[in-house]
Amino acid sequence: MQFAKRLESLQANVFADMDRAKSLAMAAGKDIIDLSLGSSDLPAAAHVIDAIARSLQDTSTHGYLLFHATAAFRQAAATWYTQKFGINVDPDTEVLPLIGSQEGTAHLPLAILNPGDFALLLDPGYPSHAGGVYLASGQIYPMPLTAENNFLPVLEDIPAPVLSQARMMVLSYPHNPTTAIAPLSFFQQAVAFCQQHNLVLVHDFPYVDLVFSSEASNERESYLTSQKNYQLPITNYQSIAPSILQADPDKSVSIEFFTLSKSYNMGGFRIGYAIGNAKLIRALRQVKAAVDFNQYRGILNGAIAALTKSQIGVQHTVSTFKQRRDAFIGALHRIGWQVPTPAATMYVWAQLPPPWQQNSVDFCTRLVETTGVAASPGAGFGKSGEGYVRFALVHDPDILATAVERISVFLQSN
């Protein structure tokens, strides 16, 4: 039996690899503390669950759901964006429901790339961004992210031959896995760059609300002012992470992906949407139409409730992850592992101590084997992620403290 060559590029997956390592540790009797997957342990709000529960009793919701029947959800998404970012959105032509933002970022390359075309991706970056390019038979140019540049790409370093074959750039801030925040001024720079080089600008935006403070603003300024030919004014970081559409209000080259998995703790419900350039939305809709219909109408009803009703649950989620961040960082510092305090997301991006700095996979594999603590190796997110490990803060502070105690024993014994 023969399979397509494109599968060869999909063999490695950081989450699948760690899932196997966790299974082996569980089989060996280890008590697992799973910090490897960014799946929120918090519940969806009661009004979201109520909307879905009421839908179940309505038999008219039990059939297929085609695009035009998603109008109420698209209107709710458009209104949410306008209220949050001041961006006018046409719900009929500029919004598309998705099964999470991962579906959108994986399918969009099929609508943009011809075989051999380049996509410019963040390195490290979220694995599905690369997976979608491989499925479209495209090539990847990794844009290295370093601590020295505050984990923002240096666009001027992209080689001209690559740019001549490039068709799209993918950004994602607040960033998974590095937790970095990009200011609006960087997005303005990226929009101008993509307009100049005729690139589609894709922004994956799942952590829009998981921002804790303005701690990172000064660090971003030092990067931006160092850029070659930088002329845009520096915009102060605000409490809400900026949307790419604020830098491209005419939606000339941009499309943004949002999921309700993080802000609203609806990961298992698989609901998100794309918003942006009408031509890009239409092209993605064509791809999606060949793959699936939409979700169950009841899930969309729950999402409408999430977007339009009380946002107190979002505030609670942000407060909970901030508390966990502070507890976990404090515990790491007490055992001598000095890591920066993230200003956003549900993760801690930690540079590995010697002798593990060149083998994050080995570190994570041995850590879960010997202690039951599971984390994600930085190398699984790209070459530039080597030397780091990502911890997901998906447990209460007391469990996180236990995890750090086990990590401390592991580090001392190695």
Image (spheres, rainbow, N blue to C red):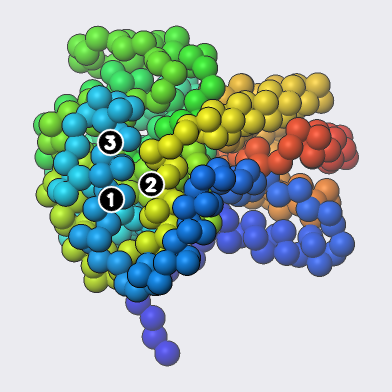
Marks 2,1: beta carbons within 8 A: yes
Picture residue at 70% right of the left edge, 60% below the top: 21
* Residue 122 seen anywhere in this rendered image of the structure: no
Vertical relation: 132 (above or below) 315: below
Per the image, label 2 sits on a secondary structure element best described as: helix
Tag 3, which secondary structure?
helix
Q: Residue at x 63, y 43 (%)?
A: 42
Q: Is residue 301 visible?
A: yes
Whichever of callouts 2 and 1 sits on the residue coming sooner in the sequence is 1
20 lies above or below 203: below
Residue 148 position, x and y percent, is: 47, 21
Q: Is residue 408 left or right of residue 292?
A: right
**Which structural element holds mark 1?**
helix
The residue that disc 1 covers is: 72
Residue 74, position in %: x, y?
A: 27, 48
Q: CA distance from mark 1 to mark 3?
A: 11 Å
Residue at the (17%, 28%) spot, across then down = 249
Tell me if 13 is positioned left or right of 184 in this view: right
Residue type, numbered disc 3: Thr
Question: Is 406 displayed left or right of 296 in the figure?
Answer: right
Q: Earlier in the sequence, mark 1 or mark 3?
A: 1
Q: Looking at the image, do the residues carrying marks 1 and 3 touch, with CB atoms under 8 Å apart?
A: no
Q: Nearer the viewer, residue 175 or 119?
A: 175
Is residue 406 or residue 228 the one in the foreground?
A: 406
Residue at label 3? 79
Q: Position of residue 360 (x, y in %)?
A: 64, 44
Amino acid bearing label 1: Ala
259 vs 1: above or below: above
Can you identify the residue that label 2 sits on?
Answer: 304
